[in-house]
């Protein structure tokens, strides 16, 4: 006599499970992608804030502060830029500007933004040191805090 107790799944059962998994993927994938982009944007904003904080700390050094106040456009401005929309925005610090030399020693040679929100924006992120009545403060233009936004705002650090 043949045993009729198969311990496997039938084809119909497998197709039903695959169909349920497909529906779940279609529903959940967009939400997952939103959360991934939001976390990338938060990481980028943390990197921008870290650059700004290190700019303020570096300006406590008299030599750096003097070079910034002498020529703020060249010596006190950091721009995270890219050649075109869609390519990663980044800044490479150089040794010829005292502020950038200090940032390079603390943050490394290059800081790159990874979120598609910043990289699809046509606005560059610029951090600048501004002298407000004898006090050096850091401001950012092009700062984006909403995923998917294409233009940024100004923010003080």
Image (cartoon, helix red, strand yellow):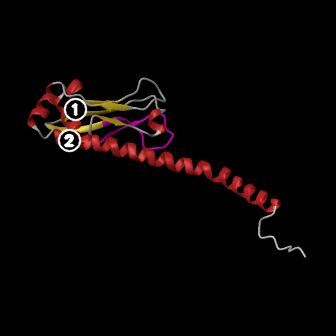
- The answer to whether marks 2 and 1 mark residues whose Cβ atoms lie closer than 8 Å is no
Mark 2 / mark 1, whichever is N-terminal? 2
Report the residue marked by disc 2: 56
Name the residue located 51 percent from the left edge and 50 percent from the top edge.
Answer: 35
Q: Nearer the viewer, residue 145 or 153?
A: 145
The stretch in magenta equals: 140-157
Report the residue marked by disc 1: 100
Circle 1 SS class: helix
Give the quarter of the figure containing the C terminus.
top left
Q: Is residue 69 left or right of residue 85?
A: left
Q: Nearer the viewer, residue 28 or 9?
A: 9
> Can I make out residue 20 in this image?
yes
Q: Is residue 39 left or right of residue 65?
A: right
Give the quarter of the figure containing the N terminus.
bottom right
> Can I make out residue 157 in this image?
no
Q: Nearer the viewer, mark 2 or mark 1?
A: 1
Q: Residue furthest bottom?
A: 1
Instruction: Indicate whether 43 appears above or below 127.
Output: below
List x then y, in percent, for residue 87: 45, 29
Q: Nearer the viewer, residue 101 or 123?
A: 101
Q: Is residue 136 left or right of residue 28?
A: left
Q: What is the spatial separation of the Cα atoms under label 2 and label 1, in whole angstroms?
A: 12 Å
List x then y, in percent, for residue 49: 31, 44
- Crowding around mark 1 (Cα neighbors within 10 Å: few <14, some 14 to 19, many 20+) is many
List x then y, in percent, for residue 151: 45, 33
List x then y, in percent, for residue 110: 31, 34
Magenta residue check for 30: no
Name the residue located 13 percent from the left edge and 33 percent from the top edge.
Answer: 64
- Crowding around mark 2 (Cα neighbors within 10 Å: few <14, some 14 to 19, many 20+) is some
Q: Is residue 157 left or right of residue 9?
A: left
Name the residue located 61 percent from the left edge and 50 percent from the top edge.
Answer: 29
């Amino acid at each position: 006599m043949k045993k009729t107790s198969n311990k496997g799944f039938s084809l119909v059962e497998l197709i039903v499970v695959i169909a349920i998994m497909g529906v779940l993927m279609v529903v959940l994938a967009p939400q997952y992608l939103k959360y991934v982009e939001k976390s990338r944007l938060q990481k980028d904003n943390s990197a921008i804030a870290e650059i700004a904080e290190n700019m303020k700390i570096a300006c406590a050094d008299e030599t750096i502060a003097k070079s910034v106040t002498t020529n703020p456009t060249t010596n006190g401005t950091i721009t995270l830029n890219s050649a075109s929309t869609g390519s990663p925005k980044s800044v490479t610090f150089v040794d010829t500007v005292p502020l950038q030399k200090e940032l390079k020693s603390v943050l490394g040679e290059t800081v790159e933004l990874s979120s598609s929100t910043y990289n699809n924006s046509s606005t560059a992120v610029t951090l600048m040191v501004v002298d407000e009545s004898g006090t050096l403060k850091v401001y950012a233009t092009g700062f984006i805090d909403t995923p998917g936004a294409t233009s940024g705002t100004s923010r003080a650090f």
